[in-house]
Amino acid sequence: MHARGPRLPRATVRRQQARPKGRSSPVTSLGIIGSGNIGGAVARLAVNAGIDVVLSNSRGPETLRHLTDRLGPRARAATPAQAAAAGDWTLIAVPFSAAPHLPADALVGKTVIDANNYYRLRDGVITELETGSLTAGELFQRYVPGGRTVKAFNTIYFEHPLPRPFRRVPRPQRAPHCRRR
């Protein structure tokens, strides 16, 4: 027994210190604005993890029926503003040029996952990014001023986060650095 009470293992102490204050509940719903390759892949992972997803795109909820049917009862379609309002967190997976049109009011106080990349040929010339006066993350934060932005999923190929049950990672047979057990 330590003078201040029982000693806890270091891992337990670190875990307790790492928990954010004031947020004890886990993410139970994810709003997704942009239901293309990245948005669809993250939606599938979230549903498989037991998280409800609300998907949206620029063409309207009725165009997402095929995707929501495939994902099952944890997925539903909505408008971008409804998806932003419904999610504990919101993933933004749209072309960078669409960022100024995001429902910023619905994202106030939310964690916003920014999966954008600026591509000049697709998004047009954005002077602040071309001159280097702002980074893409800084400019994105201006479009959602009340949200807490996190940059994620923007450097991976959309199929990489998905489990591939039939694809096996090649492993060397009897490699010299491996011991036989």
Image (spheres, rainbow, N blue to C red):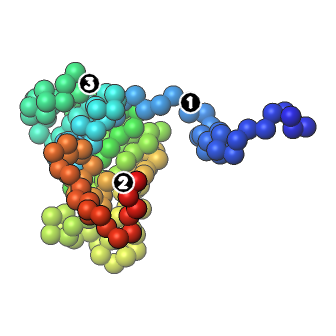
Label 3 secondary element: loop
Q: Amino acid at mark 1?
A: Ser
Q: Amino acid at mark 3?
A: Arg
Q: Mark 2 to mark 1: distance in Å? A: 22 Å
Viewer-proximal residue among 114 and 42: 42
Label 2 secondary element: loop
Where is residue 42, by image quadrant? top left
Q: Percent x, y for residue 33? A: 25, 41
What residue do we see at 44% from left, 42% from top?
111
Residue count near mark 1 (Cα–Cα under 10 Å), binned few <14, some 14–19, many ≥20: few
What residue do we see at 31% from left, 35% from top?
46
Q: Are marks 3 and 2 in contact (CB under 8 Å)?
A: no
Which numbered disc, 3 or 1, marks the residue that appears first in the sequence?
Answer: 1
Label disc, if present, on residue 74 of the rendered structure:
3
Q: Residue furthest right?
A: 3
Q: Percent x, y for residue 59? A: 11, 39
Above/below status of 21 relative to 150? above
Where is residue 52, by image quadrant? top left
Which numbered disc, 3 or 2, marks the residue that appears first in the sequence?
Answer: 3
Residue count near mark 3 (Cα–Cα under 10 Å), binned few <14, some 14–19, many ≥20: some
Which numbered disc, 2 or 1, marks the residue that appears first in the sequence?
Answer: 1
Label 1 secondary element: loop
Q: Which residue is mark 1?
A: 24
Above/below status of 117 relative to 30? below
Q: Percent x, y for residue 104? A: 36, 43
Q: Residue furthest top?
A: 73
Q: Mark 3 to mark 1: distance in Å? A: 22 Å
Q: Which residue is mark 2?
A: 152
Q: Amino acid at mark 2?
A: Ala
Residue 34 visible in the picture: no
What residue do we see at 65% from left, 40% from top?
12
